[in-house]
Amino acid sequence: MNNKLITYLLENNLEHNNYRVLQTIFILVVLIIPVTSFMKLRNWTSEALTFQKILLVTILCMLLLILLFFVVRKFGKLDWSKWLVITAIFGMLVSFRSIAYNSVETHALFYLVIVLSVFYFDFKLVLYTTALCIAGDYILVMYFPSPSPDGGAVGQGIRYLNYLWSGLAAAIGTSAARQLLELSTQLKMSNEMLQRDIEKEQQLERILKEFIATVSHELKSPLSIVRGYAEAVRDGFNPHKHQQYLDVILDETDNMEKLITNMLNLSELENGSVHLHWKIFDLNRLTEKVLNRLEAKLAEKNLEIEKSAVMPIMVHGDEAKIEICLLNLISNAIQQSFAGGKIYINYNCTNEKVEFSIENEGLPIQEDDLDSIWQPFYRAEKSRSKEYGGTGLGLTITQQILELHHTTCQVENTNRGVRFFFTIQNGLSPDNSVTEYLGSSSS
């Protein structure tokens, strides 16, 4: 994987390397005329190197460079572009050698191609460039049989050896540099992964401690209430209120049972052990079912339900799991609502999706808390304690279930209070079959 990453990074840098090599040659070509003029004035060059020949080579190289810049701009990220650039640059330097062959100064230019090939961190390209230099020098000798003033056959053999040693050294250095880059990248990635693992472990440990402390607190309060009222009944304190005490005990045991059930549901969802039973069902009918279950709580606060639909709203999903979501969202809306207020339930249907939204008349949620209310045991208004968020797991469970349905629950403040909403697949969408509509399910 690390080798692939290095290759990917180098390929992404290929266009930059092509431009860098072309810029180097461009600078060399631009400096040819003033440098050559200075050397000629100082009599540092051989007679074979004339201004006319240098000017001809400069024009030829400039035209070729312009063409290469256009090619690199369009194909510079492709692997073959580096081979083309190096071959073209070698052709430029061959023109130097052929136009002024008897000038010893031009014989060292081939080494520049080997140096430039190192920029690409590809030892195969370096070896290819070395072979080009040896072959090019040999062909030039065959084309220009007259001996050059650099030592004849002996000088030619020494040049071949120099090309070979230079190329091998560059190839080995390139390979070593690439391996060093791979090693350093692998080490950096390992350190980053280790750091992430340490941070994740610390976060999990912190969450576990907070979870244990919160669960202990959530169970301790109702247990204390149950114990107090049970002792009052046992001791015969105020016999006329025994029925009331027993009702309180039953309510608190229901709360503890609900908390434990929610904890088990959340554990199953987070462990990925929940399998959805997909089918088409009536979301409006399911909402009515949940509202009937919560009728007593609605009556306690004298709340009115205003619903936008009375007709069937067919959706595709796990009916039992969506019922849990509706129960949590409607219960949450009841807890947040002002006494005597309204709860608005709306459906917005398209060909593909159905949006369910529930809005209550109540206090808004602080902006800083909007992204945090989905966390386990998080309560946006800690001063109101259990009046907001129930056991503190309902919204977390709702979000987990909806994520299994490839959607999410969202929340926003409105002029009237708070609005929760989510989308679910339309049961009448062409993607759903008639068989599913008739009630078949699969896990």
Image: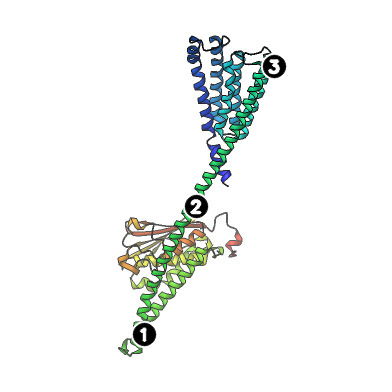
Lower sequence index among marks 1 and 2: 2
Q: Nearer the viewer, mark 1 or mark 3?
A: 3
Lower sequence index among marks 3 and 2: 3
Taking the spot 41% from the left edge, 78% from the top edge, the residue there is 253
Residues packed near mark 3 inside 10 Å, few (<14), some (14 to 19) or many (20 plus): few
User: Which element type, helix, strand or loop, lies under badge 2?
Assistant: helix
Q: Amino acid at mark 3?
A: Met
Residues packed near mark 1 inside 10 Å, few (<14), some (14 to 19) or many (20 plus): some
Q: Nearer the viewer, residue 295 or 414?
A: 414
Q: Nearer the viewer, residue 182 or 356?
A: 182
Residue where numbered disc 1 is placed = 230
Q: Nearer the viewer, mark 3 or mark 2?
A: 3
Taking the spot 42% from the left edge, 75% from the top edge, the residue there is 256
Residue where numbered disc 3 is placed = 142
Q: Which mark is residue 400?
A: none
Residue where numbered disc 2 is placed = 193
- Return the x and y of residue 365 as percentages of the image width and height: 33, 59
Q: Is residue 100 above or below residue 443?
A: above
Taking the spot 53% from the left edge, 10% from the top edge, the residue there is 51
- Return the x and y of residue 438 as percentages of the image width and height: 59, 64
Q: Quadrant of residue 366?
A: bottom left
Lower sequence index among marks 1 and 3: 3
